[in-house]
Amino acid sequence: MQRREFLSGVLGSLAWVGSGVQVWAAGSELGAEVVVVGGGTGGCAAALAACRAGKRVILTEETDWIGGQLTSQAVPPDEHPWIESFGCTRSYRQFRDGVRQYYRDHFPLTAEARGNPRLNPGNGSVSRLCHEPRVALAVIQQMLAPHVASGRLRILLRTRPVSAEVDGDRVRSVVVEVGERGRLTLVAPYFVDATELGDLLPMTGVEHVIGAESRRETGEPRAMEEADPMDQQAVTWCFAVDHLAGEDHVIERPARWEFWRDYVPQMTPAWTGRLLSWDHTHPITLKPRRIEFDPTGKVPGFNLWTYRRVADAGLNVAGTYRSGITVVNWPQNDYWLAPLIGPGVTSAQVEERLRDARQLSLSLLYWMQTEAPRPDGGTGWRGLRLRDDVTDGPDGLAKAVYVRESRRIRAETTVTELQVGLEARMAATGKSKEEVTAESFPDSVGVGAYRIDLHPSTSGRNYVDLGSLPFQIPLGSLIPRRMENLLAGCKNLGVTHLTNGCYRLHPVEWNIGEAAGALAAYCLDKKQEARRVRSEGRLLAEFQQRLRNQGFELEWPRTGPL
């Protein structure tokens, strides 16, 4: 196999695969200083950090949109209540500012909307910054563009890992399949696994965990009595719709419509009835709850139409949008019939389950269009229009399924409920709700905050939604116990099945990836191993100061629980 030098990128390489430019032959090697496998939220942040430090980076992405949760999965940012003031890295704040500026530069906003420093383009209630996936894609591309143009960054789209070569405790190379062009071997001194499911972990032999640990293993009060690798959070195939009153946009009846129309979840504690219903289980109390959906906006109180709305027509001059646009990522299209990873799960089964998840989302749309109860006593909203142009994915849905739970490394540090859970910390410290804080990690590389929010699982467990405390991200959670040159770059870090529920959201995943990219660059500069950076006080202090200089926040000001 002949070695190829790192190939300089051009701005157009953000959409390079499929362009017809033949810059390497199948079977070649491509070298860099850092290879980031997985171009989601964490992967993009990892590439940004390593490039910012002057390193040559290869970033791969399975779809043709980088950005993950923010773009290809079509999930508006889930963020903590202090995000406008503190609690994220500088570059994540630049991303948020960039989204708002993109709308000001390119959309005909009203004067009031344009002048709002905290513009929320969709006015969705789930986030202070609900936006369309393409805007997030454009902003992330802008942030990476100087590094692509300089040749430091090569982005390989439609590219997935298929195997790896390991020498003892070091990864030598990762083989990827690039669209229809064949296989390519990526070689680097450092690798970051930022794939949605932790794909590099089994390929490289990194010790890892799948699904739920037992209470005996983690000591967590809310852990399961026995470990269950098949107990994993539901995935969701999101989609976008608008509503054109008086028009008929009913889709063709989905192939699995009858199954999903009649499906009653068998869960513990019990679900409320059919999945396709406005009645569902309250995530915290687990009691039945009625929710409303009304695209006309007339229903008072909580309305699913505005929950994840990514475009508010009223913020633009009249005629810009015929309707607002909302993203459907609700309990009704959570897919929990079977997991995507686990012992004995085959690639054919994964494809079948992904098809079934798409069928669930299409069936939910068809139900909303034809049978869903309306507040006025009627049934169905025939004017709901699937906005495949917003998401650009298969069947008119998002490009990729929204994955909440990954394989997780057995790390130098594993964060448990005992360290960040509200009730667990109160019990451990004897402090009140007003006094208690999460455990402090001296090797912190960032912060985050979110409730321990677990969606219904593939083993039939209903929601687990627990109070949590604003937390830190320990450097040890990014470092496997044994492997020397592979780092966790997203939700595959050292957390448990439970604490994954608060470490998996957008600003936290960005921070995890950015810290991993910065760590790889620092290790290369100092010619040190990652675990020595963590264990040697002088190196750790220097690395943390480098992070602070780059706009990382490593500790929280005094805040309350979530």
Image (cartoon, grey):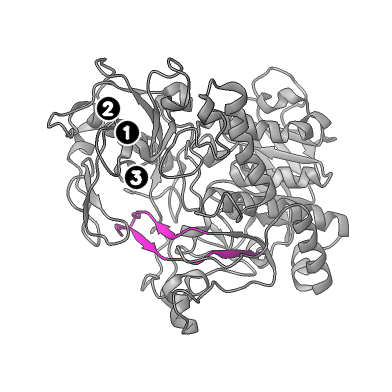
Q: Is residue 261 visible?
A: yes
Camera-nearest label, 1 or 3: 3
**Residue at the limit of the structure toward the left, as seen here:** 377
Marks 3, 2: nearer the viewer: 3
Q: Residues within 10 Å of mark 1 (few under 14, many from 20)?
A: many
Reading the image, the residue beneath label 3 is: 334
> Furthest-right residue in view?
526
Quadrant assignment for the C terminus: bottom left
Residue linked to disc 1: 359
Task: Quote the CA–CA distance across marks 3 and 2.
Answer: 17 Å
What amino acid type should be assigned to the residue bearing mark 2? Pro
Q: Quick check: 119 left or right of 350?
A: right
- Pointer 2: what residue? 254
- For residue 259, above or below residue 265: above
Q: CA distance from mark 1 to mark 3?
A: 11 Å
Q: Which class describes the residues within 10 Å of circle 2: few (<14), some (14-19), or many (20+)? A: some
Residue 257 at x, y percent in the picture: 23, 31
- Quarter of the picture containing the N terminus is top right
In the structure shown, which secondary structural element does the residue marked by tag 2 occupy?
Answer: loop
User: Looking at the picture, how far across and down is residue 108, in whole percent?
Assistant: 54, 20
Q: CA distance from mark 2 to mark 1?
A: 6 Å
Side of 392 where 267 appears, left or right: left
Say which amino acid is labelled 3. Answer: Asp
- Residue situated in front as seen by the camera: 257 or 346: 257
Percent coordinates x, y for residue 395 in the rendering? 39, 25
Range covered by the magenta-colored residues: 449-474
The answer to whether residue 219 of the structure is visible from this angle is no
